[in-house]
Image (cartoon, rainbow, N blue to C red):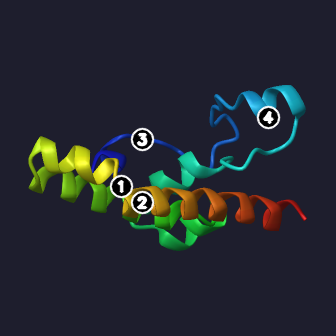
Amino acid sequence: MVSRVLSLDTESEHWFTLCWWKQWFGTDCPGCGMGRAIVCFFRGEFARSLEYHPMGVPTGIGFCLLFFAYTRVDSERWKTFLNGRIFTVCMFLYGFCMFASFLYRKF
């Protein structure tokens, strides 16, 4: 809803970047395009989100699921979940997929 209200032009050539990797090395990093992809995901533009970054849709879904879980449990269960094995495995798989998508886009 916020992404609809804010006038974020994802197609602009003046889209800012805070990516130190791109500034130092001049190439895309594993997360380049993720900001635009998430904005497009929350606007409902799923195809465009996948164009910007293959992990944009899974990241948006993950944000929604984590927000839903956070609002439904108490703080002790939330801490247990964050320190648990399921969350650790999911974050490891997410990192692996980010690196794999980087290699796929690069080569």
For disc 2, the marked residue is 60
Quarter of the image with the C terminus is bottom right
Q: Camera-side residue: 17 or 107? A: 107
Q: Image height check: is 24 above or below 107?
A: above
Mark 2 vs mark 3, foreground winner is 2
Residue at 53% x, 45% y: name it: 9
Sequence-wise first label, 3 or 1: 3
Residue 28 in the figure: left or right of residue 3: right
Residue 71 in the figure: left or right of residue 13: left
| Neighbours of disc 1 within 10 Å: few (<14), some (14-19), many (20+) | few
Q: Estimate the x, y position of residue 1 in percent, counting from the top left.
A: 27, 52
For disc 4, the marked residue is 22
For marks 2 and 1, give the CA distance. 5 Å
For disc 3, the marked residue is 7
Q: Quadrant of residue 53?
A: bottom right
Look at the numbered disc 1 and give the secondary structure of its residue: helix
Marks 4,2: beta carbons within 8 A = no
Residue 27 in the figure: left or right of residue 65: right
Q: Amino acid at mark 1?
A: Phe
Mark 4 vs mark 3, foreground winner is 4
Q: Image height check: is 45 above or below 28?
A: below
For marks 1 and 4, give the CA distance. 25 Å
For disc 1, the marked residue is 63
Mark 3 vs mark 1, foreground winner is 1
| Neighbours of disc 4 within 10 Å: few (<14), some (14-19), many (20+) | few
